[in-house]
Amino acid sequence: MAGLPLARRIAAGPLWLVPLAAGILLILVPYFNLEYSIVRQLQLAMILSLLVSGLNLSLGFAGELALGQVAMYAAGAYTAGMLSQRGHTDIVLQLVAAGVAALLVGILTGIPGLRLGSWSLAMTSFFLVLLLPDVLAIFREDTGGRNGLTGILSPTLFGRMLTPEDYFMVIAIVTVAWFAVMRNIAVSRHGTALRVLKQSPVLAASMGINVFRMKLMAYALGAVPAGLAGALFASLDLYISPEAFSFTVATTILAASVLGGSASVYGAVFGAFILQFGLNQSTEFQRYSLVVTGAFLIIGGVLLTGGLSGLARSLWKRAVGEEPAAAADKDAARPDEVPAVPGKVLKVEGVAKSFGGNQALKGVDLVASPGKVTALIGPNGSGKTTLLNMICGFYRTDAGVIALDDRQLQRMGPDRVARTGVARTFQTPNIPEGITVREAVMAGRYAGHRATVLEAVLRLPRYRKVRRADLAEADRVLDLVGIRHLEDAEATALPLGQRRLLEVARCLISNPGVLLLDETASGLDEDEVERLAEVIRRVRDAGGTVVLVEHNFQLVLSLADEIVALAHGELMAKGTPEEIQNNERVMSEYLGIDPDAPAAPHVVLADVIDGAQEGVER
Ligand SMILES: Nc1ncnc2c1ncn2[C@@H]1O[C@H](COP(=O)(O)OP(=O)(O)OP(=O)(O)O)[C@@H](O)[C@H]1O
């Protein structure tokens, strides 16, 4: 697809200039002599877009539904209002205090909400909104209770009283500054890590990311713009009351987020402006605001995947004419020299696990060494995946020891196990949406190499150093698996074979002590299996420790240095490929080949295995 020439030219330039220009226009609105009603709607829309942006951080980026933005909005507004009542009218002071107060509310409500897991954050934050009027009533001496907070003084800046025009500019500058922060977070390694978390907490933990801390960070950080919005709102009308923080406002924020596209940075602005101007089109709309909001929610959620920003993005892609990933060059050159992949010794001794009365593993031993491929085979239900999940820390052992070199893993959670050096792929490739191949691979270094969110927002030297290393390492491992030519493609758009190679690259970038490959060849055609086998050989020859859980017996025979065969949760056989091929129990129980059948087994074994394989593969 060729695309439109103008769109291609714009796409080649720095795209961030577009929102920057829009931001500058917004700041300059007071010079355009617009009607008062429009100016007011613009101010309210900017305040709403701050609220929506905060929700997007937890809902759109981290995948956690939280409705508590309104409570943090109120925390910011009442903090600023009460400061003002007491004569502290400086808007910068109020913004800082409101941001901190909202952050505290975010942390305090986020910890129990997230600890309880699944839907509890949505529920706790929902109750927070319902409880708000009562909380304000309890502290009515300070908050004015249901009557609202009066006596808020006009805002000042460094001792100077602000005119309405000045105050518009303050709101616009805060909004533009927050969206610059949000954009820097979204395109940083933290933004990618949040998308990993949204894709799957299991994936995030397997990459060494502390899921709880990451979710809390997204939720609490999302509180900051809500606090800022509260402070800006308090000084806008110089009066606040509980009605401004009602459940209707919570649904408006949610509807604007979904309509604009919650996984997008600037979608918050689209959604907020449409909701703000839409709801104020007529008094009828305002009277039935919940219904109107619901309609917007349905339009955004049902008719538009990814909201308006998702629609804009796909139209833009069509205009620019991006090449689909699958059409890219298939046989990219791979480097002859492979840098070392220093593996560690994985030892599993006497590991047992039962699920209720079902004894899935009954004391299994396994040793995987550097520079070797150790294959784990067995019929369906023999306990391979259970063992893999126990090595990775997803299941606790009932008995036995799992160690990587000298460190015991069996009591660690999955993120700690991953940080110790265990990396894994998944039976179904687990790849986050909305990021490129390069970003998906770089995410594998997130947990092992730190740069704080503040360093990312301000692009400080440590962040830039880590980022440079992320990029260089991504090039290295993408070269190693042979898909570097696809690094700018959308990761989820790759065909299955390349997605599996991407997962291997994402593991390798963390310099794993052991690489666990969970049925990596399933669903691949012959060429793809051969490419995968070549990659595994390269990793092994470079000194990596590889554990291969695989149903493709031919692949296992061609790659493995040692094969461990399980049956009914127990060791059935262990040995070299040759020994396993000659093991009658493996032949009969795993492959269903009758050892007494009249044939010269070694001559026809490959054909027999091929035939038997169809029965084994799922
Ligand atoms: N979370 C779980 N809860 C209950 N039982 C489980 C759980 N996970 C595994 N099992 C049981 O443990 C046994 C081993 O299953 P497991 O998935 O480890 O086998 P497998 O060898 O990986 O099979 P497959 O080749 O089909 O992936 C099975 O009986 C399975 O039903």
Image: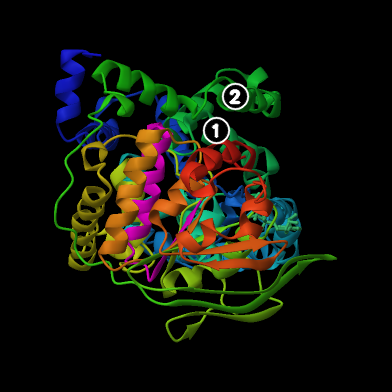
| Visible residue check, residue 236 | no
- Could you say whether the residue bearing mark 2 is in a helix, strand or loop? helix
Direction from residue 212 to residue 539 in the image, left or right: left
Find the distance from the CA under tag 1 to the CA under tag 2.
8 Å
Magenta stretch holds residue 280: no
Q: Residue at x 50, y 63 (%)?
A: 579
| Visible residue check, residue 530 | yes
For mark 2, what is the residue?
296
x and y percentages locating residue 484 in the rendered image: 22, 43
In the picture, the disc for residue 258 is 1
x and y percentages locating residue 568 in the rendered image: 73, 61
x and y percentages locating residue 4 in the rendered image: 21, 13
Magenta stretch holds residue 504: yes
- Residue 279 or 571: which is nearer the viewer? 571
Q: Amino acid at mark 2?
A: Phe
Q: Residue at x 25, y 28 (%)?
A: 328
Q: Amino acid at mark 1?
A: Val
- Residue 506 or 120: which is nearer the viewer? 506
Task: Please determine whether, in this image, residue 415 is positioned above or below residue 8.
Answer: below
